[in-house]
Amino acid sequence: MELSSNTQAIAYLVSAVLFIFALKGLTHPASARKGNYYGMAGMALAIAATLMGAEVQSYGFIIAGVAAGAVIGTILAMRVEMTAMPQLVAALHSFVGLAAVLVAIGTYLNKAAAGQLNPVLMGELSAGIIIGAITFTGSVIAFGKLQGLISGAPVKFSGQHLLNALIGLLTLGLGVHFAMTGNMASLALMTLLAFVIGVTLIIPIGGADMPVIISMLNSYSGWAAAATGFTLGNNLLIIVGAIVGFSGAILSYIMCRAMNRSIINVVFGGFGSDAGAGESAGAQAAEKGVKSAAVEDAVYWMEDANKVIIIPGYGMAVAQAQHALKEMMELLEAREVEVKFAIHPVAGRMPGHMNVLLAEADIPYDNVLEMDEINSEFATADVALVVGANDVVNPAAKSDPSSPIYGMPILEAGKARQVYFLKRSMRPGYSGVNNLLFYQENTSLVFGDAKDTIEGMVTALKGGGH
């Protein structure tokens, strides 16, 4: 059954509306599942309408590609841990970028053979290739940093910004030349340089800025898809690409504001390091005058508290401690202790990372509050329990003008009567900045794996009062 162009256009319009509903649903954890369903329905409709269009001449390669993709996607979905989700997202962005490059080159070869090239089309091809190539290699580097295949520390050298500017200008110049002449050499060199600039743009960005970079690459992938839509004359691809491009850009802006940094500062002044664990946590704590505490100390405070605020971070994700936290929350609430979770916009390695993990453990959405909602409550909290977070609670952001994170809004955990900090070691977070909260009079560190520590607290709480 072949769809008419009008019927296909209506199907694309319905798909676009469903994608907008999906985006709206993803703005809150309570509606995120419904948003995903809208997105899946929109994509299914778009694929069906495209396959039934007059432009599709045969289905052999399409079926093979869909089948291979379905198998790979299913295996990945079943095997990838939540802690590896950021690097999976980066990998998926790279696929979008590479697809844009391949589609543009394939279109050029087909149109050149048919004698149908024109400056407008070649300009669209240039845009698609440049954006797609930068997205591809940039996402590959982000994947490598997140996966630990390459160092998460910024890679910087003298003249780096000037080199990037020169490569960028040369790439744009070649794009214009290709659009005007259709010269194959300009196309090849433009593509190569765009791949290079994707690498040189991302290598100087450290681990502390990875959540913003993931969001920014998401925006790039949207623009790459939109450029491909222009190349193929597909209106739905243009609409969806623009939605992804704008939403990714807006999210990047929101996250930069949460870090009190500009996107320019993130791209050209990235910071972060992969600090080694060094000597034992207890020895480091003793040397630096940091108080350490046992599980029983924290339980003693929490079971007699009126309010406990838990701040999750990437350490919680690594340890998969969210389910143990859910059980601890229920035991404390049974003792009429108010328990809330505080989420910083850039906690974890991607936007919404902590929200997803807590939702996975069925922690009620009403117990999970964003930074702006929860900060005023720390002063009335008896205990702030920091589970694997670091930079997002570091008072240096407010008190140390020389600190790289100075000016970044933080969760004000230090205002609670007592702070218990769950960590494996004394090493700093992604920013590589020493955490001043460790040294506050009301702070004690509980060393060990977050999941084991929380499970120990659960056992102690089940054992009764004191």
Image (cartoon, rainbow, N blue to C red):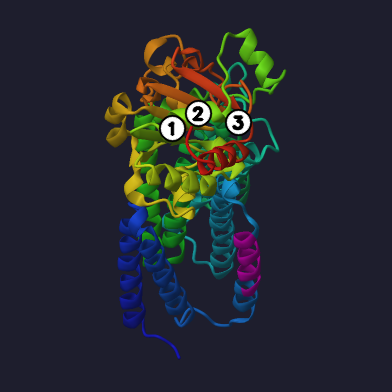
Disc 2 marks which residue? 298
The residue identified by callout 1 is 302
Q: Are marks 2 and 1 in contact (CB under 8 Å)?
A: yes
Q: Relative to 336, does residue 203 appear above or below in the rendering?
A: above
Residue 69 belongs to magenta span: yes
Q: Is residue 285 above or below residue 244?
A: above
Compute the Cα span from label 2 to label 1. Answer: 6 Å
- Please report the residue visible at 38 percent of the width from the left and 11 percent of the height from the top: 399
Q: What is the CA distance from the residue labelled 2 to the residue labelled 3?
A: 41 Å
| Viewer-side residue, 68 vs 450 | 450
Determine whether the residue tagged by mark 2 lies in a helix, strand or loop. helix
Front-lying residue, 50 or 101: 50
What is the magenta segment's predominant secondary structure? helix
Q: Which residues are magenta?
A: 67-78
* Horizontal and vertical percent position of residue 120: 41, 56
For marks 2 and 3, the one nearer the N-term is: 3
Foreground tag (3 vs 1): 1
- x, y percent for residue 252: 39, 39
